[in-house]
Image: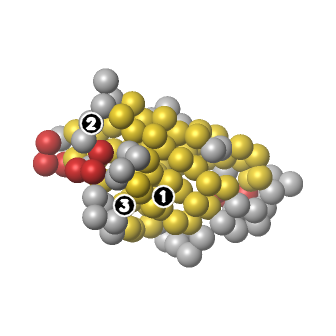
Amino acid sequence: QVQLVESGGGLVQPGGSLRLSCAASGFTFNFYIMGWYRQAPGKQRELVGRISSTGTTNYADSVKGRFTISRDNTKNTVSLQMNSLKAEDTAVYYCNADRPLLGNNYWGKGTLVTVSS
């Protein structure tokens, strides 16, 4: 069955870095747009960034220049490198796999990132 398993969350100080990973299985990974979303307490889930099957990326304005998404189609993984973290980056981060032409959209269970001193 389809699985998206996030890892790498935790507590980090403002200005610090963290790398999240998402291991995918159960679908043809290299055909899917992979994305990272986040949901802060009391707020709606929002897009952090996405990466196409060929490596084209786009990011939310709030993370541009600080966060980088990458994927490894040989290992079925997608990563989110987060630098210069701010308190407002605190959220549960979710991995997403999307293939609009088939109407397929999958979510992981999320990993918590807390930015605090």
Q: In what element is the residue under mark 2?
A: loop
Amino acid type, residue under disc 3 in the picture: Ile
Q: In this view, does 104 lie to the left or right of 73?
A: left
Sequence-first disc among 1 and 2: 2
Instruction: For the C terminus, give its image quadrant.
Output: bottom right
Residue on which the image places disc 3: 51
Q: How crowded is mark 3: few (under 14 residues within 10 Å), some or many (20 or more)?
A: many
Asked which quadrant contains residue 87, the reply is: bottom right
In the rendered image, the residue lying farthest to the left is 101
Above/below status of 15 relative to 41: below
Q: Is residue 94 left or right of residue 2?
A: right
Instruction: Name the front one of labels 2 and 3.
Output: 2
Amino acid type, residue under disc 2 in the picture: Phe
Q: Is residue 23 left or right of residue 25?
A: right
Depth check, front residue: 78 or 36: 78
Query: Residue placed at 62% from the left, 61% from the top?
Result: 82
Sequence-first disc among 2 and 3: 2
How many angstroms separate mark 1 from mark 2 (CA)? 23 Å
Residue on which the image places disc 2: 27
Query: Residue placed at 40% from the left, 47% from the top?
Result: 75
How many angstroms separate mark 3 from mark 1 (CA)? 11 Å
How many angstroms separate mark 2 from mark 3 (CA)? 17 Å
Depth check, front residue: 54 or 35: 54
Asked which quadrant contains residue 112, the reply is: top right
Percent x, y for residue 34? Answer: 36, 52
Instruction: Name the front one of labels 3 and 1.
Output: 3
Instruction: For the N terminus, give its image quadrant.
Output: top left
Percent x, y for residue 23? Answer: 45, 40
Residue on which the image places disc 1: 48
Percent x, y for residue 101? Answer: 13, 48
